[in-house]
Image (cartoon, rainbow, N blue to C red):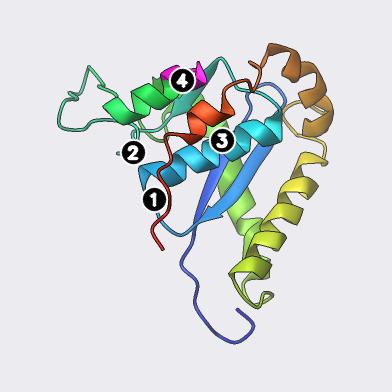
Amino acid sequence: SKHGEVFKVNIFLMILGYSRTKFICLTTDRNQETLFKCMIDGFKYFGGIPQEILFDNMKTVVDRSKSSFTQVELNSRFKSFADDATFKPITCRPYRPQTKGKVEALAKLMDRLKVYNQEFEDFDDLEKIIDEFRDDINNEISQATNIKPLEALKKEKEYLKPLNNLDLLSSHISPQKE
């Protein structure tokens, strides 16, 4: 921060495959309820739920004790969330070639965020910066598609599932402990 205070944050990123619209938010932990909350916020931002979502092998998604090198077993709570949200989860090893372009895009995004290192007062200020940054990048012409992501999202929305069951999805997030 401007005062030399160090904030340890995680950045959640969800990218739509066709439009390249990005949803970014900050988290202070990596627990499963936080993942669900971020995903619900992402669905709201996109205005719908994708048919399929690709995940790396994170422990909030994959049951590592039941998975083998060839067979990935989903965590039961995550599978229940995915079923209620009506998307098909697809798991992959992090940084596999099929996702390489999007991973490189993530690295570039993180580099662009470094300029804000000493530019914020507190966590709320940092969240505002992230929200503005998200809006900026979604209004820039994508190198992959040559279209602004938010423009392409208008067409992609036709293929997203409606947000009919947000209450059901929110029930996967237990009340936060004070």
Q: Which residue is mark 2?
A: 60
Mark earlier in primary sequence (4, 1): 1
Q: Which residues are magenta?
A: 83-89
Q: Which residue is mark 1?
A: 30
Q: Position of residue 61 (x, y in %)?
A: 34, 32
The residue carrying pointer 2 sits among few (fewer than 14), some (14 to 19) or many (20 or more) residues within 10 Å by Cα, namely some
Tell me the residue at 45%/34% (across/down). 171
Mark earlier in primary sequence (1, 2): 1
Do labels 4 and 1 touch, CB within 8 Å? Answer: no
- Give left or right: position of 50 versus 94: right
Mark earlier in primary sequence (4, 2): 2
Instruction: Please say if 84 is above or below 116.
Output: above
Confirm whether the magenta stretch covers residue 86: yes
The residue carrying pointer 3 sits among few (fewer than 14), some (14 to 19) or many (20 or more) residues within 10 Å by Cα, namely some
Q: Quadrant of the N terminus?
A: bottom right
Q: Which residue is mark 3?
A: 40
Residue kind at label 2, given as amino acid type: Thr
Mark earlier in primary sequence (4, 3): 3
Residue kind at label 3, given as amino acid type: Ile
Residue 1 or 75: which is nearer the viewer? Answer: 75
Asked if residue 92 can be seen in this view, the reply is: no
Q: Quadrant of the C terminus?
A: bottom left
- What separation in Å lies between label 4 and label 3 (alpha carbons)? 12 Å
Mark earlier in primary sequence (1, 3): 1
Report the number of discs.
4
Q: Element at badge 2? A: loop
- Give left or right: position of 36 versus 150: left
